[in-house]
Amino acid sequence: MILTLLAASALATQPAIDADTKARIDRILAQTPLVDGHNDLPIQVRGRDFAVDNLAAGADDLHTDMERLKQGRVGAQLWSVYIPASVTGDEAIRYTIEQIDITDRLIAAYPETLAWADTADEIEAIHASGRIASFAGIEGGHQIGGNLAALRQFRKLGAIYMTLTHSATTGWADSATDDPKHGGLSDFGRIVVAEMNRVGMLVDLSHVTEDAMHDTLDVSKAPVIFSHSSARAVGGHPRNVPDSVLQRLADNGGVVMVTFVPSFIENEIWAYGAMRDAEEARLASLYTGNPDGKAAALAAWDEANPRPVTSVAKVADHVEHIARVAGHDHVGIGGDFDGISSTIPGLDSVDDYPNLFAELIRRGWSDENLAKLAGGNFLRALRGAEATAASMADVEPALDKPDMED
């Protein structure tokens, strides 16, 4: 079958980085902080004792630890403050505060490696000190519980961005992986975007529909980001960014931070996932009341249908497509490490970012454009959001109304 052949043919070994290329990458990332837009470590370590479970090095069950962050030359990390989309209302606000607290304790546990940042200038200063600048990112508009006061307080607690939805459509914004209800954003959704502009919180358009992307670009006064999305023209998954949106980023100043989610990168992996989900549902019906039988049957299916794999080169294809359509000023990196169940050979954990830079160097990328990809573009977008907030200093906070929805 085609998927099985892909699995066999794509297992190419990632070429070793030669000394000259490594020196070039080191020089670029010493001058410009590598900013990763999305890492889900905080939800993975929920309930852990950081001192006991030791995230300094060798966290074998994770994609992230402090030593590998250093090896990957990470200069700034946007830590995802994720909660399930099924949690809404006041409970979502409480859960989000708990996740921000976990992020805060994680940063405090490793002061020699991590430090909170709040501005682009602080990112550069922390990077110059040899540490990794850290922010929180709210991964879903459901997390504010329909309450603009919660949005404002999350910003004060260190959240630099908010993704307008996660996997489910909210009362005010359509999710790319759920049925749409609003044709993009509702009127309250537009108020949320304006309030994010006012308080200097980046609007993250990963997870939303194409219509919601366009609605946001119509109303946002500040640059937007996609904290972990790739190019839909290369990988057709609805979580990726279509060319119609990429073509507008130059006017907005926004950045698509290319993710390493295998099903977003390779269409065959996306199709495989759909087939496996269908098989699991079929087996659940056949083996009702017999979980061991279901597990054995699914394991047999997995053995007969090996999961396809993709490559660093295919990730580079996404990067280059975005650079061609939107421009080199509008692409960045958002790996989604510790938020994915499988990885790409050569991009298996946070120490592997140099492999992507080496691939782009083989393709002829200049130091200037590599520095933009690494973090220069994100820094410019963040400074744009800071300038927008400063220009709105005299604007009164938007007020919640009784009919506002989660």
Image (spheres, rainbow, N blue to C red):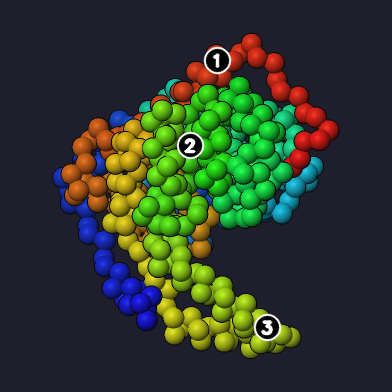
Q: Earlier in the sequence, mark 1 or mark 2?
A: 2
The answer to whether residue 122 is left or right of residue 148 is left
* Mark 3: secondary structure: helix
Q: Residue at x 43, y 61 (%)?
A: 262
Q: Which residue is mark 3?
A: 285
**Residue 371, quarter of picture:** top left
Quarter of the rendering occupied by the N terminus:
bottom left
Cα–Cα gap, marks 1 and 3: 57 Å
Q: Earlier in the sequence, mark 1 or mark 3?
A: 3
The answer to whether residue 148 is left or right of residue 252 is right
Quarter of the rendering occupied by the C terminus:
top right
Cα–Cα gap, marks 1 and 2: 19 Å
Residue type at numbered disc 3: Ser
Residue with the most extreme left position: 20
* Mark 1: secondary structure: helix
Mark toward the viewer: 1 or 3: 3
Q: Residue at x 38, y 37 (%)?
A: 247
- Residue 164, horizontal then vertical, whole percent: 61, 41
Residue with the most extreme right position: 402
- Residue 367, horizontal then vertical, whole percent: 23, 35
Q: Earlier in the sequence, mark 2 or mark 3?
A: 2
Total numbered labels: 3
Per the rendering, the mark at residue 225 is: 2
Q: Is residue 36 visible?
A: no
Q: Which residue is mark 1?
A: 390
Q: Mark 3 Cα within 10 Å, few/some/many (few <14, many 20+)?
A: few
Q: Is residue 314 visible?
A: yes
- Residue 104, horizontal then vertical, whole percent: 61, 38
